[in-house]
Image: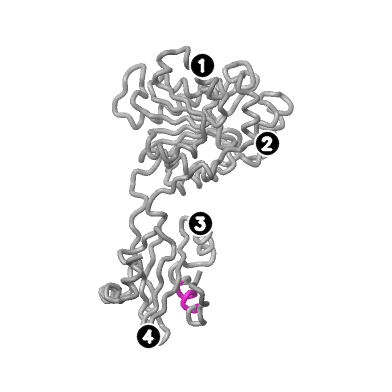
Amino acid sequence: MWRGRKLNSSGNRFLGVLRSRCWGTQAEDARLTSSADYLIILFSIYSENQFSWTPQSKPWVFSDYRIIWFKSYRMTFACLNRIKIYRYPWPRLYGTSQSTVDSSEIKTFLALAHRWWDEQGVYAALHSMNDLRVPFIRDNLLKTVAQHQPGKPLSGIKILDVGCGGGLLTEPLGRLGASVTGIDPVAENIKIAQHHKSFDPVLDKRIEYRACSLEEIVEETAETFDAVVASEVVEHVIDLETFIQCCCQVLKPGGSLFITTINKTQLSYALGIAFSEQIAGIVPKGTHTWEKFVSPEKLESILESNGLSVQTVAGMVYNPFSGYWHWSENTSLNYAAHAVKSTEQEHPVPEFVFKGETEELRHKDSTNPGVQEELKK
């Protein structure tokens, strides 16, 4: 918004110069401006001898003085030599108003809540998947642990199991010594999980269950967990990017994110939905929506954009006749991914480098009454 006045022709020419010099091609410009993380809104302040641009949106801070000055010489401007564009100087925490939970999915899993621990029932494939996913999580976490106790290799490690269901994966991780928090938006699932773990006093101490979504605990658990597990979950959320952002926010720097999910291919539709749901009845009808499936390439792109470095992507294949899973180089059906959160400072204070006369411009900033008034705001 331009404070009630339109730019004149020289101002429009200046914007064109600034865009071409600082952002580059139109394609790159469209990519940057479409992302909320790189949005810069500027408004103009006119004075008798000077022309200035000031960041409109707060609390983003763009320089020590928060003001960029351009010296005027007969309608020419000393343009920025370069601009460094950064993400927000602090993490954005997502609240419950941005839930990734799909209400229709809640109804589906609520109807099946009582069948979680039937190893021969509709969740038989998930029970069998533990033969792959538990060692996958354990072995990758042990790479970050210098010493571990025999029988309790994950002792001292805090894990968040997102979409834990009845606790099929939560309990094996707890038996390995980890302190596990299992969350699920279906309250009936949590009741089943609580009841099942009560039979083992050791698990009762190591596992905590909560009936909630990931977004509801982001603020209170920011950078709390050494690992986050989202196994067979991301294909059920309605906003994958927000979900990954929340996973990243609750991870400690250097923490691991483990995901297993289904690729978005014609083969995954044919076998994962048409055959598994409609013909063989391996999983209940309506469990999966093909449009929510995600390819490894898209998932990796989202992970990387949120400061997570992908370490491993491996294919998983289920044999419905034997009831067993095995690893594969082919990721066209199911796959597992492991990513690590960066330990580097992600949000340094942005800096602007001026083309010449920096000290002079800063001196003018500190002495100009208009600038002083802006700094007081």
**How far across and how far down the image is residue 106, in percent?**
62, 32
Q: Secondary structure at mark 3?
A: loop
- Judging by the rendered image, the residue that carries numbered circle 4 is 73
In contact (CB < 8 Å): disc 1 and disc 2: no
Q: Residue at x 42, y 55 (%)?
A: 87
Q: First in sequence: mark 2 or mark 4?
A: 4
Residue linked to disc 3: 35
Q: Which residue is mark 1?
A: 196
Q: Nearer the viewer, mark 2 or mark 4?
A: 4
Mark 4 vs 3: CB contact within 8 A: no
Going from N to C along the chain, the mark reached first, 4 or 3, is 3
The residue that disc 2 covers is 269
Image position, residue 212 (x, y; %) = 51, 32
- Classify 10 Å Cα crowding around label 1: few (below 14), some (14-19), many (20 and above): some
Extreme residue in the right direction: 279
Q: Earlier in the sequence, mark 2 or mark 3?
A: 3
Relative horizontal placement of residue 147, taking residue 194 as reference (left or right): left
Label 4 and label 1: CA atoms lie apart by 77 Å
- Residue 339 position in % (x across, y down): 44, 39
Question: Which residue type carries mark 2?
Answer: Tyr
Rounded to the nearest whole Å, what is the CA distance between mark 2 and mark 3? Answer: 31 Å
Give the amino acid type for the residue marked by disc 3 in the picture: Ser
- Separation of marks 4 and 3 at Cα, in angstroms: 34 Å
Which is in the foreground here, disc 1 or disc 2? 1
- CA gap between label 2 and label 4 equals 64 Å
Q: Which residues are magenta?
A: 12-18
How far apart marks 1 and 2 lie (CA) works out to 34 Å
